[in-house]
Image (tube, rainbow, N blue to C red):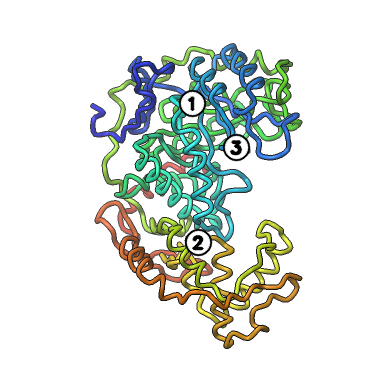
């Protein structure tokens, strides 16, 4: 039975050109055939000859129609696209892909628009940018899933960023729900012995279904699978998939130093790991000068040059793997509530998420700034940002900056922590301006070479009190959803340079992890 599973059904229209899929427990099922759906995918982001600006292979109609024929010849059923321009039209490409039975997994974040690993935040601007992609693609019947974060946490030091990524999953799913659209939203991360298992557990746990990731992908781009090390990685991947409640797959494979000529990793993924993983995505489709790729192609050009690896991969990816697949009877139902562990040594945060960014609150706050950055200030200019960051660091020694900060280590998120970096800076500048009796000298930043703006008609911050009170009432801070006893508070305690939780109950799953990891050490 799968009625109690967390279900995601894609393209249920009677006239749908592509089979509907269902994300049930830790598997993906083709509803038309009632069989296990295994991703035979490729990362698709051709760059050669692309015009300046945002990369978008799905807007290149000539290139897309060219590549759909290649996809059909290869026998793949999915592509992963990292960057698109939501302002462009994608109808022709998406329809061609759908008619060919090819699903699209789309990243919402990009290198330029994403949650930072260091000093992470989740704000109104990022949410709005993610919404634009959701709006542009959620109507297509072959959208497999949205990826809210890619390799954001890569080690223990960058674990705090995952709280903000999980918040982005919650807010994107909330937005999809408001549009009456159901598309899976999840996370893809690197393989790290210290954090991978705990990362997957963190993203899929809790009692709020909107905040729980609908899938988890593991990137193997930094790993070269060979016969000599396959047993080690098989056991490691078994550990990472332990206690899975969502579909797992390999979000990227193919070594960064170039695709292996024997494609041993294809055998590894599709023969050894199909019980726990629903296939994966080869990185990548086109040769971009990095040694990877099956073909040489150029933007807007219909010609294709197949590279030597093309036929080898085609043969490998079309092997019969039916004997390696689990049966329906082995599927586990996903429960409504999944236990979250409180912070431990290698996962230094609790399941305490920043509240949803509020445009109304931040816009109201903007009307109260008495000292603010000029319109010529560019937050993306590294020199300007460095000067501003230094100024903020100094000012926060003398004024209270807690309202604009967010710290998962302390289960704390200020009421304005979801505002943009510029809005936060203007808030701090205004606090300092007021503290210094509104003197002109106190509204300046040395070294910036730009005059700050003094606004004598700014509203009093009390005008935002009603909006603030309603926001805090709906989203109280410091709450930890442990997924078992409801919402509790794991107490952070000081341990070295980090904050760890003193509540380490429900550690049965970590005991299983420790016993399994001993197999590979």
Sequence-earlier tag: 3 or 1: 3
* Mark 3–mark 1 distance (CA, rounded to whole Å): 28 Å
| Identity of the residue drawn at 68% across and 27% down | 259
Q: Are marks 3 and 2 in contact (CB under 8 Å)?
A: no
Mark 2 secondary-structure assignment = loop
- Gap between marks 3 and 2, in whole Å? 24 Å
Numbered disc in front, either 2 or 1: 2
Camera-side residue of 194 and 25: 25
Is any part of residue 415 visible from this angle? yes
Residue 341 location (% of width, % of height) = 36, 54
Task: Give the label, 3 or 1, closer to the camera.
Answer: 3
Distance from Cα at disc 2 to Cα at disc 1:
39 Å
Tell me which numbered mark, 3 or 2, is placed earlier along the sequence: 3
Identify the secondary structure beneath mark 3: loop
Identify the mark at residue 43; answer none if there is no mark: none
Q: Residues within 10 Å of mark 2 (few under 14, many from 20)?
A: many
Q: Nearer the N terminus, badge 2 or badge 1?
A: 1
Q: What residue is shown with label 3?
A: 85
- Position of 42 relative to 347 (above/below): above
When the figure is inspected, residue 130 is found, relative to residue 494, above or below; the finding is: above
Mark 1, secondary structure of its residue: strand
Residue pictured at 26% horizontal, 52% vertical: 484
Pointer 1: what residue?
279
Label 1 environment density (alpha carbons within 10 Å; few <14, some 14–19, many ≥20): many
Q: Residue at x 37, y 49 (%)?
A: 511
Which residue extends farthest bottom? 437
Pick the residue in front: 510 or 174.
174
Q: Which residue is mark 2?
A: 419
Picture quadrant where residue 384 is located: bottom right
């Amino acid at each position: 039975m799968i009625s109690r599973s967390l279900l995601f059904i894609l393209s249920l229209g009677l006239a749908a050109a592509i089979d509907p899929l269902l994300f049930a427990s830790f598997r993906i099922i083709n509803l038309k055939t009632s069989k296990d759906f295994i991703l035979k995918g490729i990362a698709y982001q051709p760059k050669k000859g692309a015009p300046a600006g945002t990369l978008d292979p799905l807007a290149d109609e000539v290139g897309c129609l060219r590549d759909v024929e290649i996809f059909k010849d290869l026998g793949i059923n999915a592509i992963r696209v990292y960057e698109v321009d939501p302002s462009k039209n994608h109808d022709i490409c998406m329809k061609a892909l759908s008619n060919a039975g090819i699903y699209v997994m789309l990243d919402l974040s990009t290198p330029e628009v994403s949650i930072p690993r260091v000093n992470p935040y989740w704000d109104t601007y990022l949410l709005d940018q993610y919404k634009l992609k959701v709006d542009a693609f959620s109507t297509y019947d072959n959208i497999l899933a949205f990826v809210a974060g890619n390799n954001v946490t890569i080690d223990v030091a960058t674990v705090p960023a995952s709280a903000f990524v999980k918040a982005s999953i919650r807010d994107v799913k909330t937005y999809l729900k408001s549009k009456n659209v159901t598309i899976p939203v999840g996370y893809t991360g690197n393989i790290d012995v210290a954090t991978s298992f705990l990362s997957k557990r963190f993203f899929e746990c809790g009692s709020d279904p909107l905040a729980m990731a609908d899938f988890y992908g593991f990137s193997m781009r930094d790993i070269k699978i060979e016969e000599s090390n396959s047993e080690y990685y098989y056991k490691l991947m078994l550990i990472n998939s332990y206690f899975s409640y969502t579909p797992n797959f390999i979000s990227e494979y193919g070594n960064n130093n170039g695709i292996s000529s024997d494609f041993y990793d294809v055998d590894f993924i599709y023969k050894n790991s199909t019980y726990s993983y629903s296939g994966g995505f080869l990185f990548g489709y086109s040769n971009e000068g990095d040694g990877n790729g099956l073909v040489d192609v150029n933007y807007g050009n219909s010609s294709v040059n197949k590279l030597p690896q093309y036929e080898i991969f085609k043969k490998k990816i079309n092997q019969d793997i039916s004997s390696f697949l689990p049966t329906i009877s082995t599927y586990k139902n996903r429960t409504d509530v999944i236990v979250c562990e409180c912070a431990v040594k290698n996962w230094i945060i609790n399941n305490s998420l920043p509240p949803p960014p509020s445009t109304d609150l931040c816009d109201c706050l903007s009307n109260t700034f008495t000292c603010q950055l000029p319109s010529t200030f560019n937050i993306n200019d590294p020199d300007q940002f460095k000067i501003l960051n230094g100024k903020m660091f100094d000012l926060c020694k003398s004024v209270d900056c807690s309202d604009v900060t967010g710290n998962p280590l302390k289960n704390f998120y200020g009421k304005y922590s979801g505002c943009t970096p510029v809005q936060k800076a203007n808030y701090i500048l205004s606090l300092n301006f007021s503290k210094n009796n509104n003197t002109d000298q106190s509204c300046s930043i040395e070294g910036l070479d730009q005059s700050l703006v003094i606004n004598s008609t700014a509203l009093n911050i009390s005008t935002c009190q009603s909006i603030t009170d309603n926001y805090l009432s709906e989203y109280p801070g410091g709450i930890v959803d442990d997924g078992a006893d409801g919402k509790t508070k794991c107490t952070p305690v000081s341990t070295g340079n980090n904050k760890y939780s003193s509540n380490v109950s429900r550690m049965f799953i970590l005991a299983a992890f420790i016993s399994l990891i001993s197999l590979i050490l």
